[in-house]
Structure formats: structure tokens, C-alpha cells
Amino acid sequence: MSDKPTDLLGRPVDEQEAELLDLYERIKILADDPSLAPCVEKNLRFAACALAQAATDLGLAFEQF
Amino acid sequence: MSDRRYWNPKWECAPKADLRALQLEKLRRSVAWALAKSPFHRRLYEEAGVGVDDLKTLDDIRRLPFMTREDWMASQAEKPFFGDVLTAPRENAIRYHLTSGTSGRQPLRVLDSGKDWQWISECWAYGFWGFGVRPDDTVFFAFSYGSFIGFWGAHYCCEKIGALTIPSGNMTTENRVRQLVEMAATTVCATPTYAIRLALEAEKQGLDLPGSAVNKLIVSGEPAGSIPAMKRLLEEKWGAKCADTAGMTELGTIMMFECAEQPGGAHIIEDHFIEEVLDPETDEPVPYGEMGERVVTSFGRGMIPVIRYRTKDLVVKVPHDHCTCGRTFDIYEGGIQGRVDDMLLIRGTNVYPRAVEAIVREYNEVDEFQIVAWRREDAIDELTVLVEFIAGFAGDRRSALSTLAADLKRNHEGLRINVEEAPEGSLPRFELKAKRLVDRRNQG
């Protein structure tokens, strides 16, 4: 069974898109770390919103938070 | 290498079948989110007995009940200030806005999260990029930056694009005109009405707007931006290309924009919205080319799901291939053509304020106007168009008034419409949405 990421239509994503999705997932996890200083946490959350938008625009992800 | 003519080439030019599949997937996820998080929507869908599993094709959207402004307002009245439409506590929000209240009703109050604001500016970016705004542009916002959401999203979109952005919230009209010329703004954003006012002010100050650096005028907030005569007038006075955009506070952003090809209408941002056009009486879909009411589903506003929202805007949708730009997004021909609740019935004839404006704007000697509906003592309804001429107009006023009256009559099935001159400076001027219709028929 393949665990390669797919887009919202279930199609495999290309290398660049996979990298974007990976970055988005990692930044969300990082931003949830309660030990982060406010200056880090808030900027990561801001960046996560921008990455969420890029991933949504490409049809790779779509979620509300 | 992506095609840099488009903000999002992947979806702006996607095959229609892919676009529809994307919309269905986003619709299912949006309904799931609303059901899980918004008591307002849960109640709506439970009463209708509909859930995510009922959405198997895009046509199944019709199984979802409408969201109406009336229900939304009732929810706000019952649970001030925001009703029970919110999907998250207000602590998640970073901004508060409210509707402009041009229709005289209580304003709607909205909250948006940081993620929502990324999306709000993103939709504007489809439009601004599509009309040619680039990082080397200087964009001047003739906008008050207040509680009305207006051009806020457009401002952030320009920052995202990397253009130099000039806010002018604290400036007078006189200062704005001087500033935008001095700063060599290439793009100006305003409502159509205010763009005219700025141009008249420039003339008064002896500033040469057509000779200035401005080459793009982007308007929003009123249907007038898609009225050909108004657009011609704006382009002539500014010496710039004029593009219309349209949105609403209920969405937080724009859902359509005119591309650089300007096919006589505005593209719908179809990867972020579903726009249905329905017969307002029967709620049945109308085919391409026929006028109906916009019913919008938004995919971007997380804190307030907007799903099958009845806008009361009248539109005519035509296929994407009416434009040669390469986008596969369908088009609203002529932009927003009117409002379902704006129509006046005068002695048996339907009169739409936008149609009146389209005729009045053919007269360059008219500076400002107002449409007044009133009732005679014998209970006959009358319509009077009050007209203010531009300062220093030296032509034959009486002749201009009677020509305009004849024009209005010819375009309204022979209905007599009174046209009268109003004293200079007596009619209201507007910076945000213009309100030129006064209905006095039910006043004692």
C-alpha cells in the first residue's frame, strides 16, 4: 500500500507539492509546542495560515482551524 | 514554470470537470465543519434531515437548505452579538467588521480568524493579479479603513503581491487626490461613486489625472462599476483602465473580478466559491444567459460558514469561453445587475435603480443624482430623478433634462419618469456605498 500524498481529488502530488504539504504539517506540529516563546509560537501560527492558504490554492489540503 | 499571467494557474485554467470535483470535495468538508461546529448550521441541517453523506454530486447542493440574512439576523438578535453561527470562540478571532447598512437594516456583525484573513486577501489577489497589479505597482486606497470591511482585504492582497501600498484613511478628498498624483500611484482603489468625486476634485485643483501615473482603477462596493457608461466615464476622467470587483461583508471578500481582457463581465473565483443562479420565485436553477438570484457557498470563511446564502443580487451567468483570457471560471455578464429587493413597481412597470443609473451616466453633464419614489394624493406612484449638473455647466439645462426624461421613458416601456434639477451641492455625496434611491411612498 502506498503512503504517497495525494491532492483533494485523490491524485498523486508532485515533488514540490509534497514538500509544501510536509512543511505545512510540520509547522502545525511545531506551533503546538507549549514550550515555545510567544514570539516563536505566534509567528509560526501566522506562517501556518499562509501555508494553509498555499496548500488550499493548489487543492492539496482543505481544512478550517 | 507556471504561467505568471494567473495568480493560481493550476485552478484558474483547470478543466471544468476537475473544478467541479474540487468544489464537491470542498462542499462536503465545509458542511461537515459547519455541522460539527456551528449550532446555527446544525439546526438548519437537522431540520432539513440532510447530512454530508447526502452530497454525492454537485447537484446535491440543492438538498441543503438556504441560509438567509433574516435567519442570521434573528440569530444575532437572540444571542448578541454574533448569534450562534460561529464555529469557534471569539478568542480565535482577530478582526470584527459589520455591514455598511446601506439598506437601512440592522448591520450584520462578523468575526474572522487569522486563517480567514489569509483567505480574504487571497481572493482579492486573484482579481488584482488578474487585472495586472504587480510588485512594481503603487496602489493607492481611497478608503476610510473603518468598520466596513470594504477594501481591507485588497490592502492585504497588495502587501502579499509585494506592491507599494498607500493607505489614505485619514485624508480628505482634496489631500487624497494630491497625494496619489504626487506619489505617482499606478493603481487606485475606490467605489465607483467616489472615484468620480476624486476625478472632479482633481479637475477643481487643476491636476491632470489622465496625465498622471495612474493606469489602473479598481472599483468595488456598487454595481455601477460594471455599467458601461459609468466605466467609460471613469476611464475618460482617469485616463486609466477600470475594472470591477464585487464581494460582500457576509463573505468577507470578493467572489468575482474582471480580468485584463475585460469580456464585459467578471470571472467567478470558482475554486473558492460555488455560485448558483436561481429563479427567486421558484428557487429553480436558471440556464446560462438568464437573470436570476445569486446563491453563494464560500469555502474560505472558517469562523462563519456561508453555505447556500441567498444574496438577493441579480446576475446573468455565462460560460467561461465568453472570455479569451484562458480562465475556465464562468462569468457574471455585466457584474451585479441589481437587487431582488431593489426593484420598484411604478404604475405596473418594473424599475431597477441600476438601469436608471446606466442611463443617467450617459450624460457627462450630470454630476450627482437621486431617484425618489413618491405617492400622489390620488394614490398614483411617481418616480422623480433629481439631477445635479457639474459645476459651471454652460449648456442648455432644460433641454438636457427633457432629453434624459425621454431616454428614461423609452427604456422603461413608456413609463413617464420626472426629471428635475437639484441645486448644486444639495444631493448627498458618498465615499463608501452610494444610496441614491429614496422611497417615500409609505411615508405619512
Image (cartoon, helix red, strand yellow):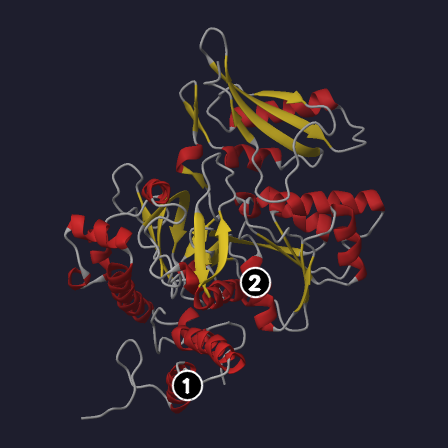
Q: Chain of mark 1?
A: A
- Give the residue at the far front of this rendering: A35
Residue B354 image position (x, y, % from top left): 51, 37
Q: Amino acid at mark 1?
A: Leu
Residue B40 image position (x, y, % from top left): 28, 51
Which element is circle 2 on?
A: loop
| Image point (78%, 27%), residue name | B395
| Image point (67%, 47%), residue name | B195
Report crowding for label 2: few under 14, some 14 to 19, many 20 or more residues within 10 A (C-alpha).
some
Write down the quadrant of residue B425 in the picture.
Answer: top right
Residue B211 visible, this angle: no
- Give the residue at the far bottom of this rendering: A1
**Total tally of numbered discs in the picture:** 2
Measured in 3D between alpha carbons, the distance from the residue under mark 1 to the one under mark 2, in whole angstroms, is: 41 Å
Q: Nearer the viewer, mark 1 or mark 2?
A: 1
Give the residue pinned by disc 2. B260
| Image point (49%, 75%), residue name | A46
Q: Chain of mark 2?
A: B
Give the residue pinned by disc 1. A30
Taking the image as shown, residue B81 lies to the left or right of residue B153, namely left
Q: Is residue B436 above or below residue B328?
A: above
Towards the viewer: B225 or B424: B424
Report crowding for label 1: few under 14, some 14 to 19, many 20 or more residues within 10 A (C-alpha).
some
